Image (cartoon, rainbow, N blue to C red):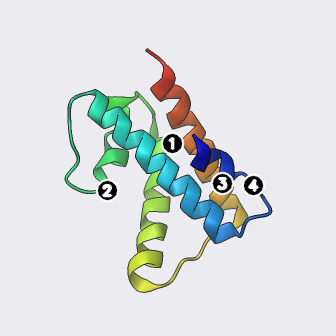
Amino acid sequence: MVRLHDAQNTTLALESRFDLAYNAAHALCLAALRRMGSRASNRYIVFQVLPHTLGLGPEVWRVLDKCHNTRNLGEYEGMLDVDERLVTDLVTATEAVSRALQKP
């Protein structure tokens, strides 16, 4: 996935990397949900159901939950507060989602 790859480009601004990784994670989680024949009524649901759609545990969905809340603060309150650790954890969690989605 191009967004996930680009999120790892350290020449980009940290906020841009966060946005790219978050949107990659959301797209992958949405694909997993749709593969099971379901649709989400809001963005957050795709992360909540990861244990059911891809069998992923709290080490993945808790990171995505934190990033969802961070994204919302940035989008709706204008307070995007990200650091290198959060982006690194987000990329790692998104890679786990990508690997799980590729399994049959």
Give the alpha-carbon distance from disc 3 to disc 2, as whole Å. Answer: 20 Å
Between 10 and 61, the one nearer to me in the picture: 10
Task: Mark 3 vs mark 2: give the one in front.
Answer: 3
Give the labeled residue for mark 1.
60
Which residue is outermost to the bottom?
Answer: 78
Disc 4: CA contacts within 10 A as few (<14), some (14-19) or many (>=20): few
SS at mark 1? helix
Tell whether label 2 touches label 1 (CB within 8 Å): no
Q: Residue furthest front?
A: 2
Q: Earlier in the sequence, mark 1 or mark 3?
A: 3
The disc placed on residue 7 is: 3
Which amino acid, by three-letter code, is at mark 2? Arg
Give the alpha-carbon distance from disc 2 to disc 4, as whole Å.
Answer: 25 Å
CA separation in Å, label 4 and label 3: 5 Å
Q: Earlier in the sequence, mark 1 or mark 2?
A: 2
Q: Is residue 62 among the parts visible in the rendering?
A: no
Q: Are marks 1 and 4 in contact (CB under 8 Å)?
A: no
Tag 4 residue: 9
